[in-house]
Image: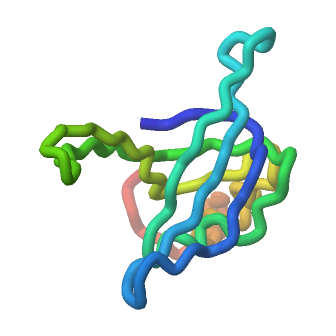
Amino acid sequence: MDIKGKVHFVSDVINVTETFRKRELVVEYAENPQYPEFVKFEATQDRVALLDGLSVGQDVEIFFNLRGREWTNKQGEKQYFNTLQLWKVNVLGAAEPSSAAAAPSIPTVDISSDAGADDDLPF
């Protein structure tokens, strides 16, 4: 799944345990500009680095997975939680690499009629 919006908040890294860390990103999503939504995404473990360099106000495209889980509290009541777990962030409007720089270098070949004067091909 993916969504486009504007960065509203980026949290610091939160060390939940010695082996688990996370970071939160809130994006202003304005499907209807009159009533914007503030959607919270979560990056875990190595993906917390995806949020480095993001600034409030930047336009971004977020790729994420929807996760849900069931939990039973001490009173035996079941509760349900959803998480939007991001796995990729693209900053929109950033300079994209030019196609010439991204394309592999192809050697040029001279195909003019004089190039192979001693060529004995029949065509």
Going by the picture, which residue comes out furthest to the bottom?
Answer: 18
Q: Where residue 4 sits: x, y (%)? A: 64, 34
Pick the quarter of the image with the N terminus: top left
| Residue 20 left/right relative to 111 | left
Instruction: Residue at 36% x, 40% y: name it.
Output: 82
Q: Nearer the viewer, residue 13 or 72?
A: 72
Rendering coords of residue 15 (x, y %): 52, 80
Is residue 37 among the parts visible in the rendering? yes
In depth, the one of 84 and 49 nearer the eye is 84
Position of 114 with respect to 98 (left or right) is: left
Q: Is residue 63 left or right of residue 52?
A: left
Q: In this orientation, does residue 106 appear?
A: no
- The structure's colour scheme is rainbow
> Which residue is more in the foreground, 81 or 41?
81
Q: Is residue 121 above or below residue 3?
A: below
Q: Residue at x 39, y 62 (%)?
A: 121
Count of number-bearing discs: 0
Residue furthest to the front in view is 75
Q: Most extreme residue toward the left, as rendered?
A: 76
The image position of residue 2, as x and y in percent, is 49, 37
- Judge whether 70 appears above or below 31 on screen: below
Which residue does the image show at 18% across and 46% down from the upper left?
75
Name the image quarter holding residue 28: top right
Q: Residue at x 41, y 83 (%)?
A: 17
**Residue 33 place in picture, x, y as percent:** 78, 14
